[in-house]
Amino acid sequence: MVHRPVGQKQRAIDEYRNVIKVAWEGREALEERGARLHSVTAEAAGYLIPLLDKNNDSEEIMRSRSASSKWKRSQDRSLRSQYRCGPV
């Protein structure tokens, strides 16, 4: 469990949203250089989603989960192809 100072929830939400925005905008540059990095977007989304209101922020929650999932799948495919062995 992450402990947050009282009254900092909205600030945390705003900061996580900004991290996701900046990371998502820079993902293509990382991919072009062949970067094999843990997704900052996925990590920030993991912290952000529990802070959001399930009713009022349902669309953002869905988008964050989708973006996180897409990144993880693309990294999984990339790693599998990188370490694929030839026929035995």
Image (tube, grey):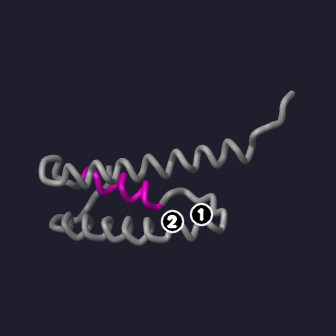
Element type where label 1 sits in the image: helix
The residue under label 2 is which amino acid type? Arg
Q: Is residue 22 above or below residue 58?
A: below
Q: Is residue 83 left or right of residue 24?
A: right
The residue under label 1 is which amino acid type? Glu
Q: Residues within 10 Å of mark 1 (few under 14, many from 20)?
A: few
In which quadrant of the rendered view does residue 51 lie?
Answer: bottom left
Report the residue at 36% width, 55% height from top.
45
Element type where label 2 sits in the image: helix
Instruction: Specify the segment rendered in magenta.
Output: 40-50
Is 58 inside the magenta-drawn segment? Answer: no
* Residue underneath mark 2: 27
Which residue lies most toward the left here? 56
Where residue 27 appears, as percent x and y from the top left, is 51, 65
Foreground of the two, 27 or 13: 27
Q: Quadrant of the C terminus?
A: top right
* Residue underneath mark 1: 31
In which quadrant of the rendered view does residue 5 lie?
Answer: bottom left
Where residue 38 appears, as percent x and y from the top left, is 54, 56
Report the residue at 84% width, 30% height from top.
87
Foreground of the two, 18 or 12: 18
* Residue 41, disc: none
Report the residue at 16% width, 52% height from top.
53
Where residue 2 appears, as percent x and y from the top left, is 32, 54
Report the residue at 43% width, 54% height from top.
42
Q: Residues within 10 Å of mark 2 (few under 14, many from 20)?
A: some
Q: Is residue 41 left or right of residue 47?
A: right
Where residue 66 appears, as percent x and y from the top left, is 37, 48
Q: Are marks 1 and 2 in contact (CB under 8 Å)?
A: yes
- Is the magenta region chiefly helix, strand or loop? helix
Q: CA distance from mark 1 to mark 2?
A: 6 Å
